Each structure stands twice: as C-alpha cells, then as structure tokens.
Image (tube, helix red, strand yellow):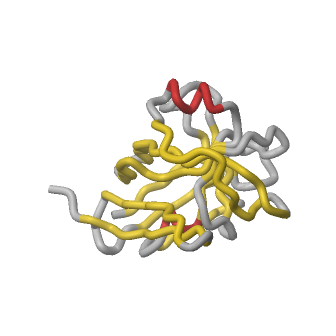
Amino acid sequence: MEQRFELDVSASRPILRLDHLFPGCTALIDTGALFPVWTKNRELLEALGAKICKRNVLFSGFGGNVSGDIYTFTLQLGKLIYPEMHIMACENNDIPGYFIFSATMFKNTVYTINDIEKKFIIVTQDHQICRNIIIKDEDGIMHVLCEATACE
C-alpha cells in the first residue's frame, strides 16, 4: 500500500501537515529520532485524547538529556493507525511543529521524503496498517518496541 502526504512547501525541513487533527497542526519528520515527541503544551495533547502513562522520565534528545512525560495517543496517518502509541511530551517551542515523528514510526516500511515535489511517501510492503510503538523503561534505559499487526 502506498500513501502520499503533502509537506509544507514553505519549510526548509520535512514538515508534514496534520490539519485533520486541528488546523495548523504539523509534524517534523526526524529520521534520526528514536521516540515520537510532542513538543507543545500538554493540555492541547490531552484535549486531543492523549492519556498520561508516566511523568518525569529522563531521556536523551534535543542535544542532551531532558525530562518529559510519556503519553499514549491513538494517531491515524492516512490509512496507517497507531493505536495507543507511546509518545514523549517535552515542551520545546524552538522545534517546528507540534510533533516530531521518529524513524521508528515507519519501521518495516519504505518511506521517502521528496523535497523537490514536497511529498512524504510511505509504502507498507507488508500491507499491515496497524503499527504499535511502545516505549519501555528497563533498568534506567529507554527502549522503543515497534511491531506491525494485521487489522481485519
């Protein structure tokens, strides 16, 4: 299954428009990121239906170690569904967009950032639309577990 999404034509970075969540919502696609991150205030995230899992978790990112909260949030991106996806919430208004979409979100897919035509293309060769991403804290080390599951 191939899906195409519009990138923000005025941005110099790959910024995905998520107007289906709310007008002006965007996500920075970060191929080096391990965790999906919400970068704005938590009240808005909770208004979108996110639920808190764990508070004050230390993780590395943004050039050092930072503290944030782990939430679960069901996200639909085109036909891809991320049920109860774990995301870190760490307010940082210097980051463009509301979300950082990590490379781990697209594990077992072929994804392309076409900066000429300003398209983000995801191909799920396994034809599975449901993707599970779970952040686990084991022995003080954060892990992201990713798997695809079939939806019928």
Q: Nearer the viewer, residue 30 or 42?
A: 42
Above-or-below relation of 144 to 62: below
From the viewer's perspective, is 134 left or right of 18?
left
Task: Please tell me which residue is depicted at 38% across the width and 60% down the height of the picture.
Answer: 132
> Residue 80: x, y in percent?
37, 53
Q: Quadrant of residue 115?
A: bottom right
Q: Give the total number of marks visible in the rendering.
A: 0
Q: Quadrant of the N terminus?
A: bottom left
**Residue at left offset 60%, top offset 44%:** 55
Q: Nearer the viewer, residue 26 or 2?
A: 26
Q: Is residue 31 above or below residue 17?
A: below
* Side of 69 relative to 145 (left or right): right
Question: Which residue is nearer to you in this view: 133 or 23?
Answer: 133
Residue 110 in the image: x percent, y percent? 48, 73
Picture coordinates of residue 138 (x, y %)? 52, 71
Task: Return the residue found at the far front.
Answer: 139
Q: Is residue 41 left or right of residue 65?
A: left
Residue at the (56%, 32%) spot, across then down? 45
Q: Write down the quadrant of residue 49 in the picture.
A: top left
- Which of these two is toward me, 109 or 49? 49
Quarter of the image with the C terminus in it: bottom left
Give coordinates of residue 54: x percent, y percent: 53, 47
Q: In the rendered view, tell whether residue 94 sits above or below residue 132.
A: above
Residue in view at x 64 percent, y 40 percent: 26
